[in-house]
Image (cartoon, grey):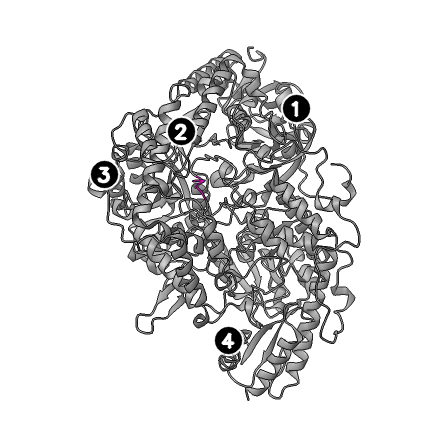
Amino acid sequence: MPSPSELRYSKEHEWVRVEDGVGTIGITDYAQDQLGDIVYLDLPEEGAAIKQFEKLGEIESVKAVSDLFAPIGGEVAEINQEAVDSPELVNQEPYGRGWLLKMRLSDESAVEGLLSAQEYDELVAAERAEEAAGP
Amino acid sequence: MSHPYIPATEEDRRAMLEAIGVSSVDELFADIPAEHRNPTLDLPPPLSEPELLRELGAMAGRNRPAAQMPCFLGAGAYRHFIPSVVGQLVSRGEFLTAYTPYQAEVSQGTLQTVFEFQSLVCELTGMDVANAGMYDGASALAEACLMAASITGRERIGLLSTVHPRYVDVVRTYAGGRGLAVDLMEPDAVARLGDHACLAFQQPNFFGYLEDADVLSWAAHDSGALLIAAVDPVSLGLLRPPTDYGADIAVAEGQPLGVPLSYGGPYVGLFACRGEYLRQMPGRLVGRTQDAEGRSGYVMTLQTREQHIRRERSTSNICTSQQLVALAVTVCLCTLGKQGLRRVAELCYHKAHYAASEIARLPGYSLPLEGVFFKEFVVRCPLPTAEVNRGLLERGIIGGLDVSDRIENGMLLCVTEMSTREEIDALVQALGENL
Amino acid sequence: MNRTNQPGLRRRELGAALSFDLSRPGRVGCSLPPCDVPPSELPPPGCLRDELILPELSQLDVVRYFTRLSQLNFGVDTGFYPLGSCTMKYNPKLHEDVAGLPGFAGPHPLQPPETVQGALALMYELQGLLAEVTGLDEVSLTPAAGAQGELAGILMARAYQQARGDPRRRVLVPDSAHGTNPATAAMSGCQVVSVASDGQGNTDLTALAQALQEGDVAALMLTLPSTLGLFEPNIVRIAGMVHEAGALLYGDGANLNALLGQVKLGDLGFDVVHLNLHKTFSTPHGGGGPGCGPIAVRAHLAPFLPDPHVRHDEQSGRYVLARPERSIGRLGAFHGNFGVMVRAYAYLRSMGAEGLRQVSEQAVLNANYLLARLRDAYRLPYDRRCMHEVVFSGSRQKARGVRTLDVAKRLIDYGFHPPTIYFPLIVDEALMIEPTESESKETLDAFCEAMLAIAREAEEDPELVRSAPHEAPLRRLDEATAARRPVLRWRREEAGRA
């Protein structure tokens, strides 16, 4: 299934939805599938300033830990407490109720440096092919 | 000829070589540089089972084990009662020869006993959560200090000078690895606490006496440091648990609970902390969950803290710990039970105080320290401690630890429920005759 | 379906009770003597605890409870347990008797040395035997496990370099390394640098040269054979490169079972090596320890060994514990897991040089036999001879929707303990199998039959494999909920809810 076209994507498998200077950030369906059952979210506090592509937290599944990187820079406005309390939402609705945080963007134009849905899907297809090849 | 531990016969080997497609086993080692293959291995010739028993029996016979003599030596390892069920249950092959319970469905024995262990350590210490065990009490204390540094982001470790000197040494080794500084301070000088990650103390302390834990707790928390208590688990049958005085992390040496002296190891470190610090805890954790049919079961959990997942960012590098020893502690506590542990603690207390008061009445002997003690105390001898101990040994008694480097002619004596009145009276008499 | 290997494993009763649940007020598990001294006044109430909650069980309750729990376990004693790099070989019962002798089980660690010369002699001789096996000069028995041995080794490397006025801060670790390696490096205050493996499963020499070139390298930590079960053909060259850069070559000896008597790590250029007595040297795994992780070092590193070391005075003939001149310090309150040392010593005295050679030969032969029999059904990521363990990839089965995890769980139904899964990380859907020399050909054949059957099931009935195990005491456990909402202890308020 193709990734939602209204979103923009980073190479680290995060997505961002920009509306009125606020970016909603989450991880992609491919990312949640790779991670497996997500059990814990380690997110920054409200008010924290994060630069684009800087590490902003960690996401844990039963058997793995993955760094989260900011697809776009700004100040943390809100954390999705619902997802923090029930991390399984990130697996179930990665683009919906499983969003992670909202940021007040410092530079909205930075979204141009991100991938479109089609570009992101091509990236994922290439990664899947590489994985299947070996070792 | 086949070896009892290697079942393959000539015929088996031939069949296997054929299946692999090589003519000799030698070919399987072809990657090893030829010039280094087949080195001389200068080892003693192999012994059969009866020969081994004879030889090692002789070696064992050259030791005079404290467990079989009147022994008043403590200082971190103790002669306590071990109920017979402990050894019997712990040596069952299903416990003994299992490995880390990675496949939960076939390891419920180990996993449930770890959950029991965690629960028992929480009940003893009052803490919210306990792990599956560390190598020993000393390394548990060291890892607790590292954990405090990680939580507070501070780089100095505060340690009371009355902590066991060997525990201090271990803390220094671990702290040095992480580039943390260790500050030893006197119990009455804790106002010196400044930018410290923790204040760690031993309760009862190295000399056997209780510190003023409430004062220490206040000093630690007032300066934003965590309070770490290294406790005697037997004493917790009688004395208030570390949560009572606000400890954030509690560690202990588990050997007193059902573990043989075994010339120093294997022992097990107990490690417990407040719930808010759960994710910074080192060591394994077992949690309860359900299987696909709704039945209760146990699994290793929160493994993302550990080395096999988080690697260089893990809370510790610990992998194999001391599981079988933790099992011994678990069985022992279940056997002693609520009444038994209390009883053991009381016996230790009364016997130690009897011994102390009898010794104090001997001319030339005194009790140089004041305060409440549990099962260990210090006496000042009229002669050099080493001399007194030699005299005791000649009478078949193992005396206390020589602490004359801290207290002049000082001897750290330990009396447990295993010391009979006869043994204590014999000790007192021997000390009296030493003059 | 072959179910011969699971005596006693049976479906678990609903609502498995804990000791706390079986407890009844007033029951006692053992008797204690009355107080034979006049009682003293107890400490002030402020020092005493109000309540102590511990189980109250009769002695038979205790025996039944733990006996039945043990029957839910799988051990080497009950069946084939081919965990990779764990060396689940037979744990000789003889060693249990020896370790239990009062002269070994009874001494206090601080007893005067003249009263424990037998114990000290054993430790001293064990130091020597392990030095001989590794081809290095001095051995310390104090580390309690492999990870603690690693910590000692890296701290020693740093101390040595510091003492020469050449402090180093980076540790190189192959991407196939066990997690303890980078974790240890971090605990030693070092930065961890990963070195890639090449297409044959060996260390990529170009990557290594690059990493060394960047300087400030304290050590390269190598497992030999690697966690892929493969021997580094370029090991001597690698040692040369490392030494030329002024770094030390650290050996993770977890896989020594492949090399006993075949080659000495010291001869290959290793400077520091840790051993796992609970793997190579037959001491029991105990469900997760105790182990013992001695380190062996070259003479120039000996002064930095952990405190204490067993020394022998030639003149008096006495053995003593001594602190090495420039020791990195203590790792524990005493001198290591003596009880484990006794067992390893007994093993070495039982096997002798020829016995150890037979061990490595058979271990390697057994693993290659598994490789030959399974290579058509499972993908072999590196098409070359393995040593004592073989790593397969479940990627072929993954294409059918059956993952390595599922294969592992299905093996349980066939009466085997699964091999190691998802390690090493560089192999997709890794399945790491170490049979050891203890297993008969019949066992290996039965295991192969099971693996081949599962491969067929993955093609013909994948759902059967995906929903395994069907025959274990429990079905698959919900690890996600266990991590999301951890329940880590019994609580009185929750009692009654199983």
Please tell me whether residue C393 is drawn above or below residue B308 in the rendered image.
Answer: above
Q: CA distance from mark 2 to mark 1?
A: 35 Å
User: Label 4 belongs to which residue?
Assistant: B405
Instruction: Name the chain under label 1.
Output: A
Q: Tag 1's secondary structure?
A: helix
Question: What residue type is disc 3 on?
Answer: Pro
Q: Is residue C272 magenta?
A: no
Q: Which residues are magenta?
A: C86-90
Instruction: Name the chain under label 2.
Output: C
Q: Quadrant of the C terminus of chain A?
A: top left
Asked if both marks, 3 and 2, belong to the same chain, the answer given is: no
Q: Are marks 1 and 4 in contact (CB under 8 Å)?
A: no
Residue, x 60% and y 24% (percent of image)? C470
Residue, x 39% and y 64% (percent of image)? C121
Crowd around label 1: few <14 · some 14–19 · many ≥20 (10 Å):
some
Q: Are marks 2 and 1 in contact (CB under 8 Å)?
A: no
Question: What residue type is disc 4 on?
Answer: Asp
Residue A89: image tag: 1
Left or right of C194? Residue C466 is right
| Furthest residue toward left | B35
Residue, x 71% and y 75% (percent of image)? C37
Residue B235: image tag: none
Residue C391: image tag: 2
Instruction: Name the chain under label 3.
Output: B
Q: Identify the image quadrant of residue C329.
A: bottom left
Question: What residue type is disc 1 on?
Answer: Leu
